[in-house]
Amino acid sequence: MNASIQRNLAIAAGPTLFLLLFFIIPTTGLSKEISSVIALGAWMLTWWITEPLPIAITSLLPLIVLPALGISSMSETAQPYGDPVIFLFMGGFILALALEKYHLHQRIALNLIRMTGTSGNGIILGFMLATALISMWISNTATAIMMLPIAASVTNLIAKDLSLEQDDRFKNFSTGLMLAIAYASSIGGIATIIGTPPNVVMVGHVKRIYGTDVGFADWMIVGVPLMILALASCYLIITKILFRNRLSNIPGSKELIENKLKELGPVSGMEKKVLIIFGITSFLWIFKQLINKVIGFGLLDDTSIAILGAVLMFLLPAASEETKARGLLEWSDMKNMQWGILLLFGGGMALAGGMEKSGLVEKIGGYFRENQISGAVLIFSLTFISMALTELMSNVALVTIFVPVVFGIAEGAGINPIYLALPVTFAASCAFMMPISTPPNAILFASGYIKMKDMIKTGLLLNLFCLAIIFVLAITIMEAVF
């Protein structure tokens, strides 16, 4: 079947499914409003998965459907597209653009790799730590793209050095290294609100539906331990269980890293300025509550801090003579901004608002009020479901659709909604089993060093480790923080 026919079928599938559900669901006794929102969610999900249109364009459907069906007015529907949490992520995007423009993320990564040694396991550890640290702040896809050529250079060194009798050692090292980078790209994003889009979607849902802020520091209190434990599990699985490489030293690897650092040259004044702004922004995010308490009023919130950092990137002049009249960033740099993701957030939150207003969330809550289930069972079950679904669909789409449903379950069970929504959101970033599950998986799989069976068995084992870690953190640290 050619691409044009596939696209046309995918386009037709969305509205067809919408119409079927729109007319069939009311026969089950549910209201017209609830039926309409479920049908809209199915339409959007169909197009998000098949992508006959850009994901961002699909995210505009609520602006057409919700007002037309009388579920909410145009102004009410459009409001989520300008939600403060969208500007929080936009500010984070701009900070990431500056890191990438001046190659600061690459310098940080190379220095971390240099610190962990030249053994096979040491190099894998260095790449994992560098990848996760960078992915806490910039796109996991961009991180994977950056790390792949460096990793490929290291594997080429080994291929030249090892004899044919040592092919298993080379295979285990190269496979383990590429898997480690793919997984660390996703794991790193768990640690901060701006680390990956699903985190921002969940925070936006909490803010819009409950008027509650999930603080940057509060998120990190749970997210950073989860990241560390997940990375440790990943390292253990790759280097001690599945892909033992037994390489005590890799000749030439140290020189390779040093040469790449030399190519970057000495740290420039522009890099220093970017690092200072980034440091100030991170400091304000982490200590926001303490600062507000000291000054006696709520001067700072996460969004205003993100926009402050973004504005400073344009305000501070670049250090070189040629560009001294210009800022560290210019408007032309914004062509690399992921504008579509911001529309995706808005569409997701508009759909969630429709779920709330139609009574769907309350309906789900009522079911769980009548059928009492313990909080621990709900956390484990919903986390498992999220982890299974994220292997097959976009984690952003999953969180967009699933978290409002989770809120209804939490309300019905009498549980703090964050206790259920946060583990579900974390689990949505644990897509480790297939190349199609995340862009980093696909990028590193394309290196040619990973076989499908290796990714499936490693990803499955890592999923089980992460499921246990998320569950334990959910019933311990998370309950104490939120």
Image: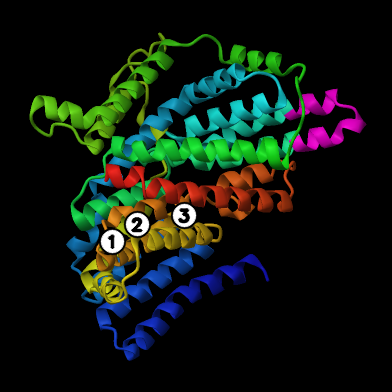
Give the class, few, some or many, for how many residues have Cα within 10 Å of label 2's Cα (few <14, many ≥20).
Answer: many
Rendered position, 407 above or below 271: below
Identify residue type, mark 1: Ala
Residue closer to the observer: 326 or 122:
122
**Residue 386 in picture, x, y percent from top left:** 46, 59
Identify residue type, mark 3: Asn
Rendered position, 414 above or below 465: below
Q: Earlier in the sequence, mark 2 or mark 1?
A: 1
* Residue denoted by label 2: 420
Location of residue 35 by image quarter: bottom left
Rendered position, 110 above or below 10: above
Q: Is residue 314 visible?
A: no
Badge 3 marks a residue whose secondary structure is helix
**Mark pair 1, 3: CA separation:** 17 Å
Residue 139 colored in magenta in the image? no
- Of circles 3 and 2, which is in front? 2
Q: Earlier in the sequence, mark 1 or mark 3?
A: 1
* Residue denoted by label 3: 395
Mark number, residue 350: 1
Q: Which residues are magenta?
A: 155-172
**Residue 368 in picture, x, y percent from top left:** 30, 72
Identify residue type, mark 2: Leu
Q: Earlier in the sequence, mark 3 or mark 2?
A: 3
Magenta highlight: main SS:
helix
Say which residue appears at 28% left-offset and 24% top-offset. Answer: 312
Badge 2 marks a residue whose secondary structure is helix
